[in-house]
Image: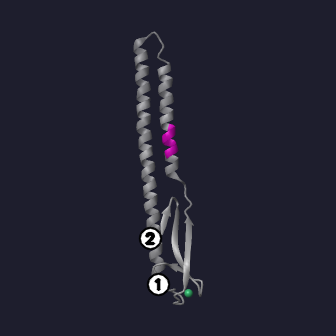
Amino acid sequence: MKVQGNVIIRRMLQCEKCGEIFSKDFNRCPKCRSTRFSGYTVVNPVARLPIESILRVMAHLMWMFGTAACLFLLWQTDSPDTDRNLLLMLAGFAALGASVIVSVALFGMSEMMYRIVRIQLRLRAFFEDQQKQDK
Ligand SMILES: [Zn+2]
């Protein structure tokens, strides 16, 4: 059994006598006891919403938005009032800093989701293998 992205690829065996498909952990067909079988690969595409990709897109949008806001606020610092200019500059860099922090958090969440999903897929494939053997 292998996990490639969202797809579980499991190597199974097919009996040449009765056509039964079974796990490669069996050394003979569980149905007819034949020892003649060929390699067989089952691919399970797992359909689901790619949340980690959505989080990654949101993270990119966040830092881009923060950079745009910072540039916009810095652009406004041309008034004769120095205090106002300073405040706008501070606001600009605060917006940039906040957006970078949020974007890093989103990237982290996306990475965590990706890892959790991989573990779930592995566990599911493992338990399905176990159930097949119990039968
Ligand atoms: Zn068989």
Label 2 beta carbon within 8 A of ligand 1: no
12 lies above or below 75: below
Q: Residue at x 51, y 73 (%)?
A: 11
List the residue tagged with mark 1: 27
- Residue 23 pos. (x, y %): 49, 78
- Secondary element type, mark 1: loop
- Residue 45 pos. (x, y %): 56, 64
Q: Determine if the magenta segment contains residue 58.
A: yes
Apparent side of residue 40 relative to residue 113 in the rendered image (left or right): right
Q: How many marks?
A: 2
Q: Which mark is residue 126?
A: 2
**N-term-proximal mark, 1 vs 2:** 1
124 lies above or below 132: above
Looking at the rendering, the quadrant in which ligand 1 lies is: bottom right
Q: Residue furthest top?
A: 80
Q: Amino acid at mark 1?
A: Asn
- Give residue 103's quadrant in the image: top left
